[in-house]
Amino acid sequence: MPRRITLLRHGHAEEHSDDFTRELSPAGRAAASRAGEALKHAGWVPATIVSSAAPRALATAQLAARACGYTGRIHAERGLYLASDTRYLATLREAPAHAASVLLVAHNPGLTQLARDLCGFEGDLAPAEYASVELELDSWSDL
């Protein structure tokens, strides 16, 4: 079964002394919406969205979801804050069996590393940039 994985780095955030609580800047909000519009234009509206619980990541997920037409629940997880590529991969392996596609919104450097490994992405994911790949998988656990 074809399954699409889209990895979206959170948008540009305001500076703050507490990294976790940083909010999106106006430019970050606009870029997150543009990313969602691009996903919709490509026909890649996700079946499920998982996001880091950090405010900048969650806001990116919400704005992208709205722009691409996603109407489901966004699953926010504190454990995805600045997680490793292996943690992000483990999260994808736990995606709902019925979901044909997943959008994961999270942080560098782990997200870029996963984009390189799964999607063949070169370089580093910039704020609100995404990488996407379609894989033939019987189950998400096959990742």
Image (tube, grey):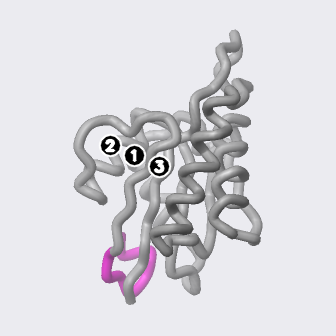
Q: In the figure, is residue 43 to the left or right of 30?
A: left
The residue located at (23%, 55%) in the rendering is: 120
Q: Which span is picked out in magenta?
A: 135-143
Towards the viewer: 141 or 60: 60
Q: Are marks 1 and 3 in contact (CB under 8 Å)?
A: yes
Q: CA distance from mark 2 to mark 3?
A: 11 Å
Q: Give the vertical position of 105 relative to 98 (above or below).
A: above
User: Which tag is nearer the camera, tag 2 or tag 1?
Assistant: 2
Residue tagged by mark 1? 85
Residue tagged by mark 3? 87
Q: Quadrant of the C terminus?
A: bottom left
Q: CA distance from mark 2 to mark 1?
A: 6 Å
Residue tagged by mark 2? 113
Residue 88 lies in the magenta stretch: no
Instruction: Say which label, 2 or 3, has the lower sequence index.
Output: 3
Q: Are marks 2 and 1 in contact (CB under 8 Å)?
A: yes
Towards the viewer: 64 or 84: 64
Q: Which amino acid lies under the numbered mark 1 shown in the image of this protein?
A: Asp
Dot 3, how many residues are within 10 Å of its Cα: few (below 14), some (14-19), or many (20+)? some
The residue located at (51%, 63%) in the rendering is: 39
Residue 58 x/y as whole percent: 70, 45
Q: CA distance from mark 1 to mark 3?
A: 5 Å
Could you say which disc has been placed on residue 17 in the image? none
Considering the numbered disc 1 on the image, is that residue within a helix, a strand or a loop? helix
